[in-house]
Amino acid sequence: MLSPHCYYSVVVVVAASSLTLGVSASAFLLNWPPSTHHHHRTIHKSSIKSINTPSDDDSTVAQISHTLQNLQKDLLANPSKLQPILEQHQHEEEDFELSSEDLVKETLLSTRLPDLELNRTRIGPSTIDGAGRGLFATEDIAKGELITCYPGDALLCEYSELDTGEEEEDFDEEDIDFEDEDYYDEEADYVEEVVLWGTHVDESDRIEEDEVFDGIADEDLPPLTSYAASVNDVYSVMGMPVLDTDPAYYGHFANDGAGHIAIQTGVDEAARMGIEEIISSYVSESVELSNAIHKPIADGLHLGTFASKNIKKGEEVMVTYGPDYWMAFEG
């Protein structure tokens, strides 16, 4: 674990939030403190857009897509197989209904396909100082090829009224409590967050929802959202670091090579350089060092980690998280 001892994240929060960059989280973590904020924005969205999008044109991707599409058809034809995901929704006592198509997508996003012929990486000590474990290629990987999949051991769902078809309720201004901090949270009335677990995750390995967002300080466990990557505006997959034996699902171990810019920049230097220059410096170096990107497979039924550059055997696989990731760990 890294020791942050810096305040860059606090300084950068306003400027970073205005960018169209996003988050793709992984194994590079700060020595986090439990957050005292609402946990809406601990992660988000897809990787920095300036990276060229890789091609789906390889046999492994075709195999995975074919398998997922067959499973999709089977689940739609046999709704009883959706019972595990449906039971989790019922446990949450939600105020909205999802379609069968939504439930199928959630089931497949939170599934690890067995026996995938995808063994191109290993986990080892990262080349980045203080980053812990990292992901390394065990063979040469060409640009555009699938490296590994990003697991959905847990699935973070952020349902808005638009997603669920709910109509906005009428309200009386006299009923507003202006001292309620939720009134000032733009998403408080519009987003419902739900955490769903993959059936492959043993009950003993699952954690409470608050711990998913806040971690467990007594056990030095960071938030599970620190290992999350966005699939779209509704779904983010979260990989559990303890599930580390299947190289077909190692995407959550890819680090951001430029994280040191975020964690080593203090208040004085931030004031001297200016926020925009710091963000620009981080983005430039992160994109330069990255050689991979997380990208949906089969119309968003899975998430894969693809090579955005040619990667040599033994080289560390790196992605870019975006400044929003680092600002989530102000400390």
Image: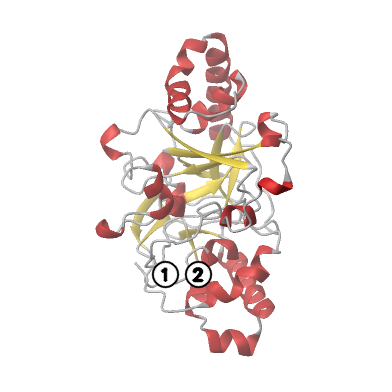
- Occupied quadrant, residue 178: bottom right
Q: Give the numbered dot on residue 285.
A: none
Instruction: Specify the quadrant that holds the C terminus.
Output: bottom left
Q: Secondary structure at mark 2?
A: helix
Q: Nearer the viewer, residue 137 or 207?
A: 207
Q: Are marks 1 and 2 in contact (CB under 8 Å)?
A: yes
Three-letter amino acid code at the position of disc 1: Ile
Three-letter amino acid code at the position of disc 2: Gly
Q: What residue sits 42% from the left and 21% below the top?
A: 84
Q: Secondary structure at mark 1?
A: loop
In this rendering, the answer to whether 238 lies above or below 24 is above
Q: Residues within 10 Å of mark 1 (few under 14, many from 20)?
A: some
Residue 254 on image: x %, y % = 46, 55
Q: Is residue 264 left or right of residue 3?
A: right
Q: Nearer the viewer, residue 234 or 71?
A: 234
Q: Residues within 10 Å of mark 2 (few under 14, many from 20)?
A: many
Residue 75 on image: x %, y % = 53, 15
- Occupied quadrant, residue 246: top left
Q: Give the numbered dot on residue 259.
A: 2
Q: Say if residue 232 shows up in the picture.
A: no
Q: Say if residue 295 shows up in the picture.
A: yes
The residue at which mark 1 appears reads as 128
Q: What residue sits 53% from the left and 29% below the top?
A: 94
Q: Earlier in the sequence, mark 1 or mark 2?
A: 1
Instruction: Specify the quadrant that holds the N terminus.
Output: bottom left
Q: Nearer the viewer, mark 1 or mark 2?
A: 2
